[in-house]
Amino acid sequence: MSQQQYPQHQPGWGGPQQQGYGAPPFPPRPPKKSRAGKIIGFGCLGVVALFVLIGIIGAIASTGSTNGDTTSATKSSAPAPAASQKSGPASESKPAQKAAPVKITAKKTAFSKSVLADSSNYTSVAVTITNNSGKQISVNPLYFTITDTGGTKHTAELGVDDKQLDTVDLAPGENVSGTITGKGGFTPKYVTYTDGLFGDPVRAEVS
């Protein structure tokens, strides 16, 4: 008995085709390009452009400052006008020196023996003292010393010379004269006067 053969079913054109096992259901879609890369690229270009702009501005500023420094250096290097110099007696004159509070003059003189002198072995100096200060000063033969040419200092001997300097107080502008006498024979070089114990010494050369 023969079997009846049935014709195989052929899919029609345009009909759905069955896919085999393991095949993807749909064809893969191409990945979308991310916009983040574009944004980063534009950002990098902007940063580079900013640095270039800053460099150009800095170069211009440094050029301007260099020109300014050169100009100021040129101005400062210009020689200053010489100060006018005054000529004549007025420029050569020195300021007047203030007068010393006490002025003393001293001269060699012969010893004039008094009744109190035990011998003639004395040396006398004639002095004149003037008070140029604004206050009263005291004058006493004991305030004087005589220094000879050898550097030896001699104190005053009282009452041995008839022309001895008196003990007085001098008002401003007053003066007094007398002798200061030292014991022994010597050549006087200068006399020194000290007003009291704490005054400043004043020295006068013996002429």
Image: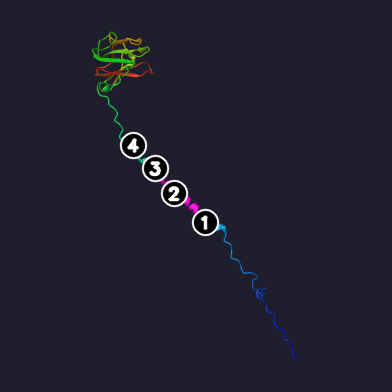
Front in this rendered view, residue 117 or 21? 21
Residue 68 at x, y percent in the picture: 38, 40
Q: Position of residue 32 (x, y in %)?
A: 58, 62
3D distance between C-alphas at marks 2 and 4: 30 Å
Magenta stretch: residue 132 in it? no
Cβ atoms at labels 3 and 4 below 8 Å apart: no
Q: Which residue position holds label 3?
A: 64
Residue at the right extreme? Answer: 1
Residue 129 seen in render: yes
Q: Earlier in the sequence, mark 3 or mark 1?
A: 1
Which of the numbered marks, if any, corresponds to residue 75? 4
Question: Is 45 one of the magenta-colored residues?
Answer: yes
Q: Which numbered disc covers residue 41?
A: 1
Q: Name the disc covering residue 55, or none.
A: 2
Camera-side mark, 3 or 4: 3
The reply to whether residue 122 is in sight is: no
User: Majority secondary structure of the magenta segment?
Assistant: helix
Label 1: which secondary element: helix
Tell whether label 1 touches label 3 (CB within 8 Å).
Answer: no
